[in-house]
Image (cartoon, grey):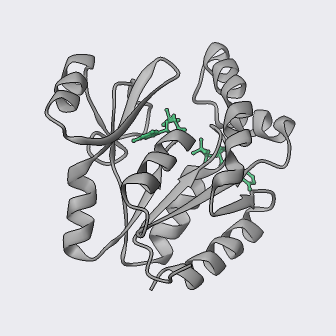
């Protein structure tokens, strides 16, 4: 596999560690930048519009689809989430490495649209029990939302076999080390 990947896609079930791992990579690799997705979901405490997501109404999201502004989008947990073309164009123009925190189907769409540039990494939980514990421990979802997220994780884990890498996110220190190895191998 070539060593000049520019679109680094990180997927995992909800609670799998995408945010933690993305934050680590962003702090470690100066050329990396986060792909800010558009979403119709409610902003969580601590999140900021234009930093974590572009928070849009359903009508605004639909109009962005109609204008062809999205490379891909999915309906997840009753909300829409999508990657903006402008984020990818910006990265292609300024030479940055773009990190994506998106779902498995979105990851395959990015790979299909940019087969040469993208690298897909799946963060797998050690077990469903650990995933549930972390998701609950984060304390950002209601019980109903947690159930929906856990129910979806089965499908996501099944699709992981088609990713370029599967990294089991057990001890965080080891996960960061494995991510560093992957970055060294594929990102210039
Ligand atoms: P995601 O972004 O995939 O939904 P997060 O990065 O928010 O997941 O992780 C979910 C929760 O689990 C967070 O509270 C995070 O601090 C914690 N967490 C993630 N990875 C680990 C790990 N390897 N060991 C312990 N806690 C972890
Ligand atoms: P959350 O609500 O926890 O921020 O995200 C829910 C799910 O949506 C996660 O699996 C996250 O990776 C995914 N997601 C976030 N942005 C995008 C996107 O632009 N496209 C797709 N396909 N999924 C996304």
Residue 24 x/y as whole percent: 55, 66
Q: Residue at x 33, y 49 (%)?
A: 36
Screen quadrant of the N terminus: bottom right
Q: Residue furthest top?
A: 144
- Closer to us: 183 or 170: 183
User: Which residue shows up at 24% across the image and 50% down it?
Assistant: 85
Q: Nearer the viewer, residue 76 or 171?
A: 76
Q: Quadrant of residue 42?
A: top left
In the picture provided, is 134 more to the left or to the right than 53?
A: right
Q: Position of residue 138 (x, y in %)?
A: 65, 37
Hey, which quadrant is residue 149 in on the image? top right
The foreground one among 114 and 77 is 114
Residue 128 vs residue 186, the one in the foreground:
186
- Name the spot of residue 152 as percent of width and height, x first: 66, 27
Name above or below for residue 16 compared with residue 28: above
**Is 39 drawn above or below residue 62 in the view shown?**
below
Image check: 71 left or right of 175?
A: left
């Amino acid at each position: 596999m070539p060593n000049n990947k520019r679109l680094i896609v990180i997927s995992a079930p909800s609670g799998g560690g995408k945010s933690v791992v993305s934050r680590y990579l962003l702090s470690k690799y100066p050329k990396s930048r986060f792909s800010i997705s558009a979403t119709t979901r409610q902003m969580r405490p601590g999140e900021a519009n234009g930093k974590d997501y572009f928070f849009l109404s359903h009508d605004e999201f639909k109009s962005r689809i109609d204008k062809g502004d999205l490379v891909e989008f999915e309906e997840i947990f009753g909300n829409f989430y999508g990657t903006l073309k402008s984020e990818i164009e910006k990265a292609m123009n300024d030479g940055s490495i773009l990190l994506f925190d998106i779902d498995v189907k979105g990851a395959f769409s990015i790979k299909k649209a940019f087969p040469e540039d993208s690298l897909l990494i799946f963060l797998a939980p050690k077990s469903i029990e650990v995933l549930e514990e972390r998701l609950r421990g984060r304390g950002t979802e209601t019980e109903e939302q947690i159930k929906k997220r856990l129910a979806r994780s089965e499908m996501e884990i099944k699709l992981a076999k088609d990713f370029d890498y599967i990294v089991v996110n057990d001890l965080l220190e080891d996960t960061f080390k494995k991510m560093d190895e992957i970055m060294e191998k594929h990102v210039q």
